[in-house]
Amino acid sequence: MVAEHEAKALLREAGVPVPRGVVVRGMDFGPVMDLREPLVLKAYGPGIVHKSEAGAVVLGLRRADVPAEAARMLAEVVGTEGFLIEEQASAGVELIVGLVHDPGFGPVLLAGLGGVWAETLRDTALGLCPISEGDARRMLGSLRGSPVLYGLRGRPGVDVDAVVKLLMTVGGAGGLWERLELGEFEINPVIATESGIVAVDARYLPAADAAPEAADSGEPADFGPLFEPRAVAVVGASTSRPNFGNMFLEFYKAAGVPLVAVHPEAREVGGVPAVPSLATADVDYALVAVPAERCAEVVRQAIGVPYVQVMSGGFGEAGRPELEQELVAAARAAGTRLLGPNCMGVYCPRGRQTFVGGGLGPAGTVALISQSGGLAGEVIKVGERRGLAFSRVVTVGNAADVTPAELLRWLSTDPETRAVGLYLEDPRDGRALYEALAAAPMPVVLLVGGRSAQGQRAAASHTGGLVSDGRIWQALADQTGATLVTSQDDLIGVLAFFQAHGTRTTGPYDGTAVPGDQVGAPGAASGDEPGSLRAASHGGALVIGPSGGASVLAADVFDRAGVPLGPLPDSVLGELRRLGLGAGSSLANPLEVPVGPRSGPDLVRRAVEVIVRHLPYPDVVAHVNVQSFFTYGTRAEPLFEYARALAATQDALPGIRVTLVTRNGECAPPGVEDEVRAIVAAAGIPVYRSMEAASVAVAAGGRNGTA
Ligand code: ADP
Ligand code: MG
């Protein structure tokens, strides 16, 4: 560990204020005469890490007290090599600012309220380096304790700009993170007051081993032939005992892509012509489904085949990393790119690529990169049922060669793809992924499995301990504008929203609450803070539908999702009353409008058109209680009429995003929901079965809107 005064020298050079102080190695305390009382005495030496715990810090000393205190420390604190005597900074708000080198994500900045706050409440925010100034402000604003920074109950706030500057000096472009061989670096605490900051403690642990190689962010491979191969080979299908290879052969036959089987003896397998070796197959893509031990041998023959997918498991994930390395080496030797191992492959209706039965769905604009083949299969099938149309789906399994980040970089340039979903389970590729996400021009939604297990890494400093949990994914999402969801259903739901509304750009508003907003934070004054409606330039989301209780609950649900429901402008109330609204209920957002078999289908449309003329709402969320249509019969026509009226609303208002929530859809006879979905889908309206699911999707849309 680097001694405190050396770590502070680094800070001073970088322009960060530190206390004036002197280092004394012997017992000559003459130099302290230049310091202003009160003084702080600290011992340093090998093994002294947490000085307070070791009795190696004394505050509030007069100059004359220093020699005696130092003598006592020398006697009592094991390993004392020398002393740092420094001026004591005035009291203020203590913050922790740290840097840690995460094995997956590289340098990560942490900021939080110091001392007991960081340790007991974990009230800290993370950012992947380099952070922007907006990131720094958002990080501070996201702390639960942030009101103490911005001023609270008559207490003045601190110099937030100085804190922001510190975060940038440590974690911004050209900051300390680029120069230190991290390791871990921690300022704990930095004391912030009204008039500035002082870093009163600094700790630096250079990395034990060399930093991992930088992210490869060069040109991605041309993945075109991966998704749209001229022809496909299947290795491992059997003539006697049908296996996975045979199953895929059948999928490919049904898809109609030119196909060849690779088999040592047979001239054909399952009606597909066979060749004895990949070396003689003229294909763009080969699927390998032979036992793990034999995969490398097969891959070595794939000379001239640009993409090989190893479906088989039994590699790194099964505790056999050497087998996986051999496979990668084989791919390199053959000059082919490897997908997997342990993955299902690729789905692309446009390219007749598939790994699911039941035929190809429609070609569309939504892409998916998944570390799980099973999940990808479900997202394809359930998603298509819900109206998704895919451009490219790719499963990566262990991602031994082709990684999610490289694929995302390619998809970012793909004219067929307008939204991307990602399902990931490990942050190995985190740094490259961060860069790819930051550069992606289209909206991205991210589902991460196993986050709760990612917090188990041991760490030497508070920063290390606090970074090592799944929250880093949220930081990644916040910094790149991606949406992080927590369920497969929301992954599909958000993709459906992007697909339906991707071209309707009306936002942006961001759900991340800035607590400072409520207390007139100086940090929130700059106008580009998330969480607030920018000077009521728009109203956020308008929720419209029947029934008091559902509307009240809707307000809570959208609030939780961070979607603002801006109040109706006063100017619109008269017109709404003339439509007959507001008689038995108040006129507010959520707006109660009768929707049911006996109310005309057009009231919602008329109300929306009136409202958005007075104040633009980027999102209109219309909800219906499907059950109410079927209490006295099974005639679905009134519900269809309502759906058509809503579709007309969307058609008439291309600048807003209409979303439909069909509550209690299980009460409809079979087929009715599908019909409703089809009616509104024609106008580009996505449908959700719960307010919760809709709120997540609308929030994601708000993150990705462009003004
Ligand atoms: P530790 O190794 O225990 O973290 P610190 O150097 O952080 O030791 O000192 C412990 C506490 O003493 C700090 O959290 C801070 O509250 C206070 N402190 C230390 N140095 C100063 C200083 N120069 N001015 C004011 N307070 C200080
Ligand atoms: Mg400290």
Image (cartoon, rainbow, N blue to C red):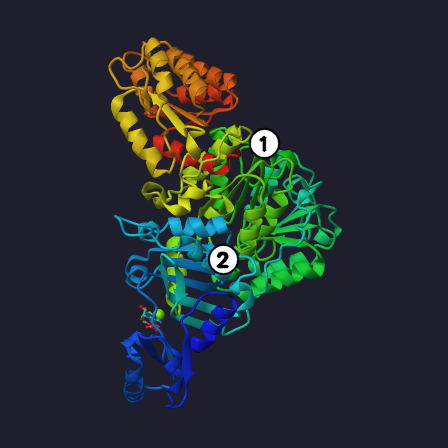
- Asked whether 604 or 172 is in front, the reply is 172
Give how far across and how far down residue 617 sits, in percent: 43, 26
Q: Residues within 10 Å of mark 1 (few under 14, many from 20)?
A: some
- Asked whether 288 or 25 is in front, the reply is 25
Image height check: is 331 above or below 571?
A: below
Tag 2 secondary structure: helix
Q: Quadrant of residue 366?
A: top right
Numbered badge on residue 348: none
576 vs 322, left or right, is left
Image region (quadrant) for ligand 1: bottom left
Residue at label 1? 364
675 vs 554, left or right, is right
- Nearer the viewer's eye, disc 2 or disc 1? 2
At label 1, the amino acid type is Gly
- Asked whether 246 or 700 is in front, the reply is 700
Numbered badge on residue 168: 2
Q: Residues within 10 Å of mark 2 (few under 14, many from 20)?
A: many
At label 2, the amino acid type is Met
Give how far across and how far down residue 379 sits, in percent: 48, 38
Residue 365 showing in the rendered view: yes
Q: Earlier in the sequence, mark 2 or mark 1?
A: 2
Give how far across and how far down residue 299 sits, in percent: 66, 57
Tag 1 secondary structure: strand
Quarter of the image for the N terminus: give it: bottom left
Identified at 52% across, 20% down, the residue is 682
